[in-house]
Image (cartoon, rainbow, N blue to C red):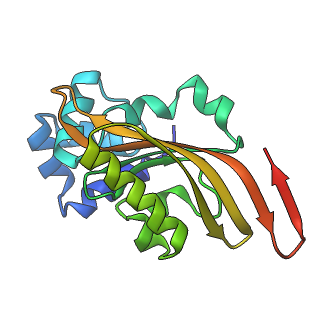
């Protein structure tokens, strides 16, 4: 198992020590350290408590070893979770950037461009309308522009409270101005 750098970044974003997280989640610090280091996978109860303390959806742990993750690796699909401030708490299969660079940041903090502003608007609309929304968003990257069909829906905790937005983005069009390539998927 790999070190859970996404979890470490969430803890540091909250300016908490491992001991503080462990205490609030009612677990031993050494157990929490093993979770961060990828040595142990927490129980569903501990996962829920950690999610409450660090503001992430408990499914983030389940997605690590899910068979769908293997099937989606290198597929033109990006999956993500963000909190109610639209800061990423988990991301999978992102182009051009290391996924851990996203954690704790909004799309505009990553790159303030028209596509990222449209993506943030989509997520904000999901939070305001409390309903799923589907839109096409075009993101300019170093390698060209990628258009995605983005399906975004409210992310709920076990009590049914909205704690963020989950997105599934499927690449539908890529343009590479350097090579003159256009690809429809």
* Percent x, y of residue 180: 89, 70
* Percent x, y of residue 118: 47, 63
Q: Residue 26 occupies which quadrant of the picture?
A: top left
At a point 21% along the width and 23% down the height, the residue shown is 45
Confirm whether residue 91 shows in the render: yes
* Percent x, y of residue 44: 28, 23
- Residue 81, compared with residue 139, is above or below; it is above
Residue 163 relative to residue 95: left or right: left
In this rendering, the count of numbered labels is 0
At a point 25% along the width and 36% down the height, the residue shown is 31
Residue 4 relative to residue 52: left or right: right
Residue 158 relative to residue 108: left or right: left
Q: Nearer the viewer, residue 169 or 104?
A: 169
At a point 90% along the width and 71% down the height, the residue shown is 179
Q: Quadrant of the C terminus?
A: top right
Q: Nearer the viewer, residue 4 or 134?
A: 134
Q: Nearer the viewer, residue 32 or 96?
A: 96
Q: Nearer the viewer, residue 28 or 14?
A: 14
Confirm whether residue 8 shows in the render: no
- Residue 4, compared with residue 157, is above or below; it is below
Q: Residue 41 occupies which quadrant of the picture?
A: top left
- Residue 184, compared with residue 115, is above or below; it is above
Q: Residue 154 occupies which quadrant of the picture?
A: top left
* Percent x, y of residue 34: 34, 40
């Amino acid at each position: 198992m790999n070190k859970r750098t996404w979890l470490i970044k969430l803890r540091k974003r909250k300016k908490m020590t491992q001991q503080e997280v462990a205490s609030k989640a009612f677990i031993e610090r050494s157990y929490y350290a093993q979770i961060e280091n990828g040595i142990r996978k927490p129980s569903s109860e501990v996962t829920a408590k950690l999610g409450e303390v660090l503001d992430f959806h408990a499914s983030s742990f389940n997605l690590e070893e899910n068979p769908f993750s293997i099937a989606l690796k290198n597929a033109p699909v990006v999956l993500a979770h963000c909190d109610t401030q639209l800061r990423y708490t988990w991301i999978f299969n992102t182009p051009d950037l290391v996924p851990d660079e996203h954690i704790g940041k909004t799309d505009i903090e990553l790159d303030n461009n028209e596509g990222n502003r449209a993506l943030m608007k989509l997520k904000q609309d999901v939070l305001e309308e409390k309903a799923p929304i589907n839109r096409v968003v075009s993101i300019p990257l170093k390698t060209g522009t990628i258009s995605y069909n983005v399906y975004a829906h409210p992310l709920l905790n076990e009590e049914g409270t909205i704690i963020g937005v989950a997105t599934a983005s499927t690449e539908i069009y890529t343009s590479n101005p350097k090579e003159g390539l256009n690809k429809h998927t």
